[in-house]
Image (cartoon, rainbow, N blue to C red):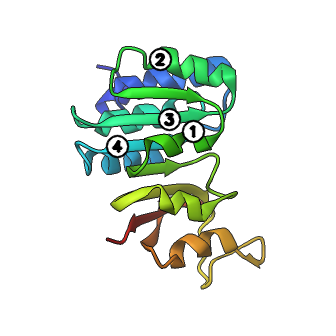
C-alpha cells in the first residue's frame, strides 16, 4: 500500500491522477472534492450517478470509489482525447459509461440520484440541471470562492449563479468549504 492509499486515496484515483498528469490536464477535482464525491455516491448505493465534465477521469474515479455494486455512473466529456482516455481507464468497470459530446447527452440517462455537474450545464442551463435530478437526488457543484456575504459575492458582484442554486425553490441547498479558498454547493431535490 502506498502512502497515498494509506491516506484514503483509492488506487483508481491515483491511476486517474497519473493519466491527468500524462495528458497535461490540470483541471481535475481536488482530493477534498473527491472525498465529497465518494461520500455522495455512497449515499445512493443503487443509484444512477452522473458527471458532466469527465476530464481525465479523476472525479469519475472518486465517484466510482463510493458506488455500490448496483449503481451505475454515466459521465460525459466534450474533449475527444480526454473522453477516449477516460473510457479506456474505466472499460473494465461495467457500472461506468463514458460519453463523448455535449453535456445534454446525459438527458437520456436521467433522472439522477447524484449529479456532479462540473462541466456543461452548470452555467448555461442551471434549471435543466435541477430538472435532471430525481426527487431526493443530490447535486454537487464545485469551484466556488467562499463568500462571507449574503447574497454571496465574487469579484465584488453578486454571484448570480451560486445564488440561483442556493435559492432554487426545487432544492434544499447549502454551501460547504472544501478548502480554505474553495467551496461547493450541495443540494437535494425536494420531493
- Label 1 neighbourhood size at 10 Å, few (<14), some (14-19), many (20+)? some
Question: What residue is at 44 percent from the left and 27 percent from the top?
Answer: 97
Disc number at residue 89?
Answer: 2
SS of the residue under disc 4: strand
Question: What residue is at 60 percent from the left and 85 percent from the top?
Answer: 150
The percent coordinates of residue 26 (x first, y second) are: 66, 33
Disc number at residue 105?
Answer: 1
> In the rendered structure, which disc, 3 or 2, sits on the residue that comes first in sequence?
3
Q: Gap in Å between the C-alphas at discs 1 and 2?
A: 20 Å
Q: Gap in Å between the C-alphas at discs 1 and 4?
A: 15 Å
Determine whether label 4 and label 2 are within 8 Å by CB. Answer: no
**Within the image, what quadrant is residue 138 found in?**
bottom left
> In the rendered structure, which disc, 1 or 4, sits on the residue that comes first in sequence?
4
**Within the image, what quadrant is residue 126 found in?**
bottom right
> In the rendered structure, which disc, 1 or 2, sits on the residue that comes first in sequence?
2
Q: Gap in Å between the C-alphas at discs 3 and 1?
A: 9 Å
The percent coordinates of residue 190 (x first, y second) are: 36, 72
Amino acid at each position: 500500500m502506498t502512502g497515498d492509499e494509506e491516506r484514503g486515496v483509492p488506487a483508481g484515483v491515483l491511476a486517474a491522477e497519473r493519466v491527468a498528469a500524462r495528458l497535461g490536464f490540470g483541471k481535475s477535482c481536488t482530493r477534498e472534492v473527491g472525498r465529497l464525491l465518494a461520500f455522495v455516491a455512497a449515499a445512493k448505493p443503487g443509484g444512477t450517478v452522473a458527471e458532466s465534465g469527465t476530464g481525465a477521469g479523476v472525479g469519475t474515479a472518486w465517484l466510482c470509489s463510493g458506488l455500490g455494486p448496483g449503481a451505475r455512473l454515466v459521465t460525459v466529456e466534450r474533449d475527444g482525447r480526454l473522453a477516449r482516455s477516460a473510457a479506456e481507464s474505466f472499460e473494465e468497470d461495467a457500472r461506468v459509461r463514458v460519453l463523448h459530446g455535449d453535456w445534454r447527452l446525459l438527458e437520456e440517462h436521467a433522472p439522477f440520484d447524484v449529479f456532479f455537474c462540473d462541466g456543461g450545464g452548470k452555467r448555461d442551463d442551471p434549471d435543466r440541471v435541477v430538472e435532471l435530478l430525481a426527487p431526493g437526488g443530490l447535486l454537487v457543484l464545485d469551484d466556488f470562492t467562499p463568500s462571507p456575504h449574503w447574497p454571496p459575492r465574487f469579484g465584488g458582484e453578486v454571484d448570480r449563479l451560486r445564488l440561483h442554486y442556493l435559492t432554487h425553490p426545487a432544492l434544499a441547498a447549502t454551501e460547504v468549504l472544501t478548502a480554505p479558498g474553495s467551496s461547493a454547493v450541495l443540494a437535494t431535490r425536494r420531493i
